[in-house]
Structure formats: C-alpha cells, structure tokens
Amino acid sequence: MASVSSTIELITREEALARPAAGSTCSQDLAKGPWAFDAPAGAAAWAPSYGPGASMADTAPASTPRQGQIPEEYRLASDEELDARIRAAKEKLGEKLVILGHFYQRDEVVKYADFVGDSFQLARAAKEKPEAEIIVFCGVHFMAETAAMLSGPGQAVILPNLAAGCSMADMADADSVQACWDQLAGLFGTEPDADGRIPVMPVTYMNCSAALKAFVGRNGGIVCTSS
C-alpha cells in the first residue's frame, strides 16, 4: 500500500487544471442528454431519477425532489453561449459567489469551480469564504445539506439540481433507522453501564441525509468520513 496516497487533497480549480490528465477507461458519454431527464414523456410515465451520470440510471426514492423544468433559453443555448454567461455571472458576482465542484463532476462543470474536493472538504472550504453570499454546490443533496450546516446566517447554499441524489445515502433513511434503534433500545437498554459505556452507539458515514446526521448526534454517535 506504500504506493497509494493516504491523503485526500482539497485542490483549487487552477491546481486541477494544471495537473496532467491521467489515463482512464471511463467514457464521458452520457446515456441520455442532460435535458432528457427534465422533460419526461408525461406525468404518468415520470419516475424520480438521479439524472445524468447516475449509476445504471438508478431509480430514486419517491421522496426525491423533482427538479423544475430548466428555462428554454438555457436548454437551447450553445455550449459557447452558456460558457460566456457563466463567466460573466462569476465576474459580476466576484467574492459574493463561491462554486464548489465535487471530484465526481464532469470536466465541463469542474472548470468553473473555485474548489474541487470530496464532500466534507468542500463544505469546510465554503466556511473559509465568509464573504460569499452564494454557495453553489455542484454535487448531490446530502453534500449541499452539509455545506448549509456549516454556512453562516447570511449565506445561501444552492444545489443546481434538486433531484441530484446518492443511492448510498438512500440506503438508510431516518424512519427506518429510528425503527431499528427502538428495537435495539428494547434489547440492550439506553443507560450507560458502571464504566460509562453506552449499550449501542450509532455511527453514520458522511453520505447520509441531514436528518440522519441529527439522529446520530442526538444519540451520542459520530459521523465519519472517507478520509
């Protein structure tokens, strides 16, 4: 394992662009165009989806927010026009805006990011920008929630696609975990023993909802990260 880096780096956009591209066997082609996910054939045929880039077109839970239709002026705009508009908006907003791009985002999104990293690193990076009034998190729902937890009262966290979800985060919903917790409490109790050890301690991975993080906190547990 000596050849594997044990450090997950938070890098700026400039650093990311300066690094040489590594060989890859992954294709950047999407199964469907980005707008196809915003224009279902009809309400009856519509099913929640994580959108472009989802693993094998995962079907999202019914509770997944549905992204509103993107205005036609953006859907019909060329890549060049969209690029010009994004850069103009960034120039006008200046320090009021910070864009966070997760490692998993595609190149055409990352190139606009002020920081590139994993979810928790990006949330902490936003905290280092107290002057930013707008935090755009190019990632999934739980990532934007984490950034919102760490943001200041005068900051707004924006998730570009409300339906951008994580199948791992959906593996444990708050209601199911609460039901499991109630059963465990019935079996093992909730009071610490003579040595101060609690019967059960909840641990959750960072890839979970804010509701689940709150549950773990209320019950004396911890949230862990990949790093």
Image (spheres, rainbow, N blue to C red):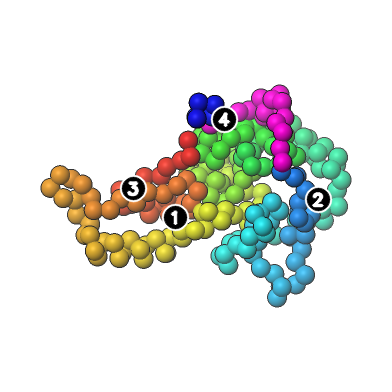
Amino acid identity at mark 3 = Gly
Q: Which residue is mark 1?
A: 211
Please, which residue is most extreme toward the bottom here? 44
- Foreground mark, 1 or 2, reads 1
> Helix, strand, or loop for circle 3?
loop
Q: Which residue is mark 3?
A: 221
Q: Which residue is mark 4?
A: 10
First along the sequence among labels 4 and 3 = 4
- In this rendering, the answer to whether 50 lies above or below 16 is below
First along the sequence among labels 2 and 3 = 2
First along the sequence among labels 1 and 2 = 2
Q: Which residue is mark 2?
A: 74
> Helix, strand, or loop for circle 2?
helix
Amino acid identity at mark 4 = Leu
- Foreground mark, 4 or 1, reads 4
Q: 10 Å neighbourhood of mark 1: few (<14), some, or many (≥20)?
A: some
